[in-house]
Image: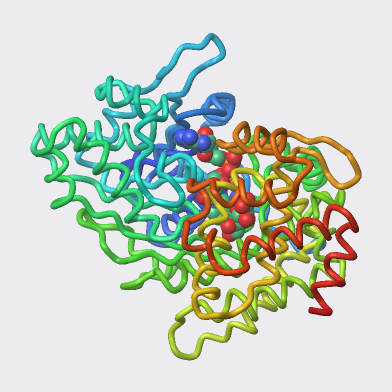
Amino acid sequence: MTAKAIACFRGQGQLGIVHLGLGAFHRAHQAVFLERYRQRTNDAAWGISSANLRSSVGLVDALREADHRYHVAEYADSDTVALREIGVIEETLFTGRDGEGRWSRDLEALLTRMSAPETRIVTLTVTEKGYFLSPASGDLLIDDPMIAFDIANPAAPRTAPGILVEALARRRAADVAPFTVLSCDNMPDNGRRTRAAVSQLAARRDAELAEWIEREVAFPCSMVDRIVPAMTEADFARLAELGVEDENAVVCEAFAQWVIEDDFSQGRPVWEADGVEMVTDVAPFEAMKLRMLNGSHSLLAYLGTLDGIETVFEAVSRDDLKTLLRRYMLEEAAPTLAMPEGTDLEEYAERLVARFANDSLRHRLQQIAMDGSQKLPQRWLDGARMRLEAGEPVPCTTLGIAAWIRYTKGEDLNGNSYPVDDPLAERFQALHERHGDDPDALVRAFLEEEAVFSPALANASGFGEAVTAAYRTLTQRGLSAALAQLERA
Ligand code: NAI
Ligand code: CS2
């Protein structure tokens, strides 16, 4: 989009969308789809006000300095890149804790924006942990200090659920119809999970408000897909070679997909011509993507990191890991999926391997490895439980779980240390300190972590023993031996 094409919209339309979680993915995915929509239709009703609730105040302010324009570099491969300038984000706000420890700098501005009748959709990419739901049970984590604060201070919320509840409460009090809430995070049933967090929090404030939310507010589910690695210095250097000096730029693959349940109470952009797929049921697409793409990503992340590998590209360049991915996708993930007639999962798997082999993306395994306690239930564990209940084996997933357990120690197989970024990192570290010398006890202790593993899976016949055997092979003989043994199995 040209600067002129962007300028003609500024101040001409409405900010019909508020986004919570101004991260790399939002800038490379939702904002790109909406920029395409706006340039094609001249419809100025769907500008975006985007807020960070927790981190990156620098990005919020840098975008303000740049008149809210930034670049997206879409790489099909290292020789093929499409550059876009994006201007559909017209406002950026910050409600987290700033450098001086003060919270909620722009909270009132955000809540006012969300309460305005022109705001008709609120989207989120706040990461799986941003909903404060137990990954295993789906219940709101009411004992979490952040949620406890929002329960005690409903008019000055700090979490995404708290901000949604307060904004909806203001709209109800002003007799303004509610916005639609659209989660764009990598969670199964992300709309229903967002509803659960919001409704459970609202019920602690006002039963009638909670009933109104249940009755009146739409929470459609969506499946989102575009590989958007965190920016590295090498990425900025590559952009500079293309003549782009932009601290707010993002780099991503050329592929993008957005599949959304068509349930919008206050209208939506007619964006199908821009590649957005509107469906009645997203669940099959979500399960396919989460188990096949994200499940494979997590296998590479934990197995690769333990062997000192840094990026997805390097990991998938190893034949033994590529073989593992294909076997996992086709023998363990695909059989758990119920896809529409004609879906070719073998072709989908091959496209995923090709996407992972994109040599222009420095997608760090450590970025994927973070928050494993929030990711693994939907990526591996739900499917593994289904397979085991059907009496089918899950050797690839079992090796992955062994690798994840070892990963949480914060030391790779060569003795190199790294930080473990996970809301439950301290709990896991304590388990290693208590049981580290006894793989049986260690694995059992991890499987008893009900925040991650359902009892049905943890107690499945032979499962614990299989994880322990994989753990022993991996830690005593290394990655190549563990993969070779799996291949013989
Ligand atoms: P990022 O690190 O650039 O942004 C993360 C965003 O989440 C930031 O705005 C941060 O402030 C916010 N956040 C983190 N913890 C939070 C909390 N407890 N409460 C409120 N906000 C919180 O990461 P990126 O790449 O934007 O990914 C964000 C999410 O987007 C992922 O967790 C995933 O669910 C989804 N996604 C990412 C893809 C990618 O390839 N990067 C692809 C598909 C989905
Ligand atoms: C990745 C995802 O960081 C991770 O956990 O697996 O962000 C992945 O890049 C996206 O889901 C791809 O659509």
Q: Residue at x 40, y 69 (%)?
A: 283
Q: Residue at x 51, y 68 (%)?
A: 385
Is residue 239 shown above or below 339? Answer: above
Is residue 270 shown above or below 19? Answer: below
Question: If the picture is divided into quarters, which one holds ligand 1?
Answer: top right
Horizontal side of 17 relative to 234 (left or right) equals left
**Quadrant in which residue 273 is drawn:** bottom left
Horizontal side of 131 relative to 120 (left or right) equals right
- Tell me the colour scheme of the image: rainbow
Residue 253 location (% of width, % of height)? 67, 60
Residue 32 location (% of width, % of height)? 52, 54
Residue 362 location (% of width, % of height)? 78, 51
Q: Nearer the viewer, residue 156 or 331?
A: 331
Q: Residue at x 85, y 58 (%)?
A: 314
Is residue 377 shown above or below 247? Answer: below
Q: Nearer the viewer, residue 73 or 446?
A: 446
Q: Nearer the viewer, residue 312 or 298?
A: 298
Q: Nearer the viewer, residue 432 or 314?
A: 432
